[in-house]
Each structure stands twice: as structure tokens, then as C-alpha cells.
Amino acid sequence: MNLSPIPLAVRSTCPYCGVGCGVTAMPLPDGAIAIAGDASHPANRGRLCVKGAALGETTSLEGRLLHPALREDGVLRQASWDEALDRVAGGLRAIIDEHGPDAVALYVSGQLLTEDYYVANKLMKGYIGSANIDTNSRLCMSSAVAGHKRAFGADLVPGCYEDFDLADMVVLVGSNTAWCHPILFQRIARLKEARPDVRIVVIDPRRTATCELADLHLPVKPGTDVWLFNGLLSYLARAGVRDAAFIEAHTNGLEPALDAAQVDCSDPLAVARHCRVEPGDLMAFYGGFAATTKVITAFSQGVNQSSAGTDKVNSIINCHLLTGRIGQPGMGPFSITGQPNAMGGREVGGLANMLAAHMDLDNPQHRDTVQTFWSSPRMAAKGGLKAVDLFKAIEEGSVKAVWVIATNPMVSMPDANQVQRALEKCELVVVSDIIASTDTNAFADVLLPALGWGEKDGTVTNSERLISRQRAFLPAPGEARADWRILADVARRLGFDGFDFAGAHEVFDEHARLSAFRNEGTQRRVFNLSGLCGLQAPDYDKLEPVQWPVRRGADGALEGSARLFADRRFAHADGKARFVATAPRAPANPVDPEYPLVLNTGRVRDQWHTMSRTGRAPRLADHTAESFIDMHPQDALLYGVREGELARVSSQWGAMVARVQHGGGIARGSVFVPIHWNGQTASDARVGTVVNPVVDPVSGEPEFKHTPVQVERFGVA
Ligand code: SF4
């Protein structure tokens, strides 16, 4: 009897949102992939949302980029890896030699694995000698990073998902958790079902699906979060709801923060008026927060994507510091990250102003530590260009080469028409991707085929600092290579040592050893992977999910850390947390008679980013088949558009066309358009062309949630 071997399921991690669910994947004889939730993974315990469950439908090779390609006389032709890598390295070298290291840049992605991110940062910051490497994570959570650093002294997320099980009150701010982080939402729903007395508060200008779980929805006027939380800080202080011993021993800066909060926000009635919420609802929130010790305030893009995003984050953290509700079970501020590896990228210095192992580029001692560890020839001396400024610099001509890896800025960036002008002008555009045809790689001089999910090996870190493995279960298609390997290949061609990694496990080991090197001789081990140093390939392959900081116990077992700051020690030099004075300010561009509506952008339930993967799974189109402009029926009447008909939404930066719908959750004066649809469809549905390029002055995160626009019937002169 001829028995075929029974294929084994491979345990990996979902490549979409920051919940970071474990999945099992099993290739079947007919070519299909059986996907299931990994019952042993602590982030999801076997559950998957519809996007995760459809992962098996996104791995076909149709439309894949399988071979390197070079543009010659305006036409892309297939090339060998040697030709392509020589072109990249030769092009970068020529530009660096003539114009200096800051004339080249990398623009990468929270889709990269930590190992890819590590090598990219090592190459740019420690060898090329420029910090012009930024990431699309800039677009979703850099305000949270900046807020953490100001408050805690480092980009540290205090809590974990278990805190959602233990809380008595969950406040969701600027987060449509039901659609954007469904498995975390289900966890909150189970909490509510098991303990109906738990209070759920949703703070969001839109009435989203998340509100179905809410005891209280505060539909705040867009951009007024700092007023709301300054008002809460002021209310708590007046009511005497403060942890005086904690504040005295473990914080600094309360008085200036309270002074700032009291300028405009000491009167709840005035706050309610300004935020356009019912005074009774506001007081119910303030009173509930005051009365509940175990309260978790989770925030996401609705907070971060703002010209005041960092202040919004700190206004939330201030309330938790005042009450000492941090670092203990069931309480704390909690940043929900958008991407699967937004956190892992931060660990290795994935932003233009950071260094690996949570060190800072503007700290000479940190620069020296990293350069010593790398034995690198040079080190970037200052922070690099953040995403929006990077593409401006390309258009202006000071940056002459850009290597875009695993992201699609022609769709995802604000003022996407500016990105197009930049790419048209750029002397050398290199794109590493898994897809042959995207809006961005239409501008590539060199296309490099990368491995996709299911083909590559490495680690990701989710919103709660949980490091999980992504494992390959499919062969590399065509000539595709791992991103870290492509970067290392280019580094060697540029003449650099230090890139001879035998596999992803060696990159990970170097990353872990750098964290341990950083911490030698210091007691403040804010980021520590010492327990993961020296993993050989078999142990790396078997690595179970673990939350950093990670040590090895006396018995040799790995010890992760569910929470930070349980010892009340923060990462500032004096060990204390900081209150940050946050003066409220309105969004940068106000509405006016020409552009009277506020455009808000975000995700829909079943699509991911620019749809290069989720667009391949037909069942994911069932939920939302095309882009749309969601607006209030009375606004539609006022502006002469009808539900189901095409309309044009335009700002001073650009325009796009989509069908009008009345979803029922949007207040008058605002419209909502999803971020996913790209320019590959019959009508260019990139909302990025409309979004203003204003950024938060601290974090550099764009204001995706507030662009003044007008809406008019499409096709009417
Ligand atoms: Fe993937 Fe997020 Fe869905 Fe989990 S909740 S399956 S990580 S998309």
C-alpha cells in the first residue's frame, strides 16, 4: 500500500493586525492551505477573525513578483539577481560618493519581520551612516512611541492583553476595535458577557461597530481628545482621586500638567460643549473613571493620527499616572498597534529617530554603544527624515535614491500626489515587494522579489510585547528572497562587513545580544532580550511566544514579562515617570466655506492596507465590495449627492471618487472614506490623494483623521 505522508501543520503568526494571533497552516495535496487558529497561542487561543481565516486564499502565485527586474529605456526587463543587486549597490554608491549618505533613503514597513528591520537599520544607520530610514509605522503609531518616551523615558507598553480580562472598566479611544482588532474585541466581549457590570466606554466621533458593546459612547468632535482627557485630569485632581504616594515617589511634572489642564478644561460643562458631547455622558465617564481602580484606556489610530497625536497620548497617560493605575493587573494605558510588527520594528530602531534596542539617535552614548557593538565604520549623527518629510526631500532633490520595502506609499501616504511627483523625480527608485504590479512599483527602476507570508522565517512582536515566530510552510517562489538577505546582499556589495548571516536565527541572535550589551552595567534594563541570546537554529525554530523583557531562569527556562513598571521604576534617568503638560490645540487645517466637511479615514473589517493580499480573497470582498464615502443623510442632501451614486471628495491636495453611503454612524459635518482601495481599479480610489500632509510636530505622524474637504456629485460640471 502506498501511503502519502500526512502533512504537518506549521505554527506561525497572522501577518495583519497588531493583535498578533497564532495560526496553524497546512498545505494540502490540492494546493490549498488549511488555516486554523493556534489554540496554544496566548494572543488568540485558537480564534481567528475573517481576515486571518482567509489567509490560505492569499498565497497564490498569480500576480507575484518572481524575478528581479530592471528598467531600461522606460521598460522593465527580467534580470538576474547579480545584475539587480549590482544596479542597486552601484546606484547607491555613486549617489553617496557624490552627494553624501543623506542623499539616499530606505522607506520600509511594519510588515517586515524583526530580522528584516534589524538588517535594514544596521545597513543605513551604522554603515551607510544616515538615519534616512523610516517606516509606514510612522503613519499609525509613532505618536504612541513619542508619548511613551516622554512619559516613561522609553517606548514601553506597560500592560498586556490579560489586563483586558481583569479590568472593571475598558475605555476604547479612537479605536474601532471590532473591525480593526477583532480578536481583542472578542476578548472584551467575553469579559462583558462574563461580567456584565464591567463598563465599556467608546470615545470616537463615529458610531462604529465597537459601540455595540459600549455602555457609553462619547461621539467627540474630531480632534478634541486632549480637551476630554485634560478635563478628566482636572476632575480627578479636584475630586481627590489621586495616588499621592505614587506621585510623590515615582513621578515628576504634575503641577505644570495640571496647570495646563486647568486653562480650558477645568469646567466639565465647557469641556462637554467643546467636545460636543452630552454633559451627562461626560460626567458619567468622568465619574466612572474616578470610581474604578481597574481601568484600562486603550487607544489606537484615532488618537495617534493627529497633528496633536503625541499630546493626546500623554493626556491619557497623565490620568493613569495621577491615579497610579499603571503596571498592575487590569489597569493602565494601552497602545493598540495597527500592524503585525509595528512593535518589533521599534525594538530594532525602525523609526528615523531611533536606534536598535530602544536606544536614541540623539544620545551620543547610545550611538557609541551601538557603533561599538556593530564595529561599524560610521554612525548616523542625527535623526533622519520622517516619512512625510522624506518624500518632500525626494521631490526637492536632496534625497536622490529611495529603496521602498514591503509598502505602497503611492496609496498609503497622505498627499499621495506629492509622493508620485517625488518618485517621478527620484534618480533611483528600488522596490522590494511580493506583488508584480502596485501603484508604487510602477515607478521602480529596480524591482526585487521578496518572500511573502508563509514563505519567510522570522519574528514579529504584537501590541503586548509578545514575540512570536512566523514560520515558512511554502517553498520560495521563483527567485524570491528574504528581505534581510536582499539587504545583506546589497550591504556586502557596498563593501561592508558584518552582514554574513547564515539565517534569520543569526540576525535574531545579534539583535538579542545587542539588547544585552546595551544593558551591561546598568540596572535599568528597559529592553532586555538576554534570555534569547545564543539561540541556535533548532531552538529559534521552536521558539514559543514570549513577552519581552526576556530572561532565563535558574532552571534555564525563558521568563517573559507580562507587565512593566510593577516595581514603579521607569526608564528616565531618575527612575520616575513624567506628567506632560498638554495644552489643547485644534487640528492644523480647519474647515472653511470651500472645504466645509472633515474627512476621516480608516479601515474596513475585511481588508488590509492597500489590499495587495486581502484583495486576492474573494470572500473578503463580500463585506465591502468597493470604496465609499460615508456621510450623514442631511449633509448628502445639503451637498446634492445621493446614496448609491458616485461623488467626488476633494481637498486642496487632491480628489477621489467613490459611491456615497449612509452607514448611520457618522455625525453631521464629517465624512469617512476607507484607506484600502488603490489606483489599480478603473477609477483611482486612493483616498491618500485627498489627505492633508500635516504631521504632529513631535512624532511626525500625519493627520489622517482631519482633512477639510468638499463632496459633490461626480460627473456634474
Ligand atoms: Fe489576524 Fe488581527 Fe484577525 Fe488576529 S485579529 S486573525 S492578528 S487580523
Image (cartoon, helix red, strand yellow):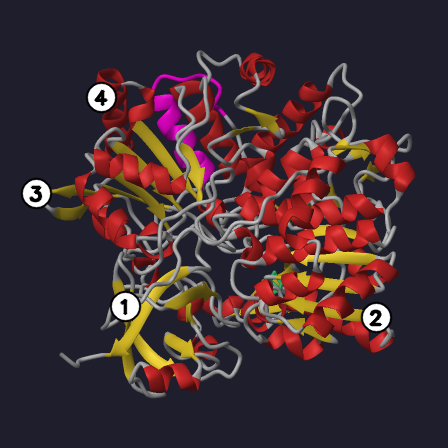
C-alpha gap between disc 3 and disc 4: 20 Å
Q: Is residue 359 covered in magenta?
A: no
Q: Residue shown at 55%/40% (left/top)?
A: 345
| Labels 3 and 4: the sequence-earlier one | 3
* Tag 2 residue: 198
Give amino acid for label 1. Answer: Met
Instruction: In this rendered view, identify the residue nearer to me: 672 or 240.
Output: 240
Give amino acid for label 4. Answer: Ala
Q: Is residue 498 covered in magenta?
A: yes
Q: Are marks 1 and 4 in contact (CB under 8 Å)?
A: no
Q: Which residues are magenta?
A: 483-500
Q: Are marks 1 and 2 in contact (CB under 8 Å)?
A: no
* Label 4 Cα crowd, 10 Å radius (few <14 / some 14-19 / many 20+): few
Where disc 1 sits, the SS reads strand
Give amino acid for label 3. Answer: Asp
* Tag 4 residue: 94
Instruction: In this rendered view, identify the residue nearer to me: 316 or 686.
Output: 316
C-alpha gap between disc 1 and disc 2: 42 Å
Say whether residue 233 is visible.
yes
Q: Is residue 336 left or right of residue 606?
A: right
| Labels 1 and 3: the sequence-earlier one | 3
| Labels 1 and 4: the sequence-earlier one | 4
Residue 13 spot, x, y in % from top left: 61, 55
In front: mark 1 or mark 3?
A: 1
Q: Are marks 1 and 3 in contact (CB under 8 Å)?
A: no
* Tag 1 residue: 656
Q: Are marks 3 and 4 in contact (CB under 8 Å)?
A: no
The numbered mark at residue 129 is: none
* Label 3 Cα crowd, 10 Å radius (few <14 / some 14-19 / many 20+): few
> Whereabouts is ligand 1, in terms of quadrant?
bottom right
C-alpha gap between disc 1 and disc 4: 39 Å
Where disc 4 sits, the SS reads helix
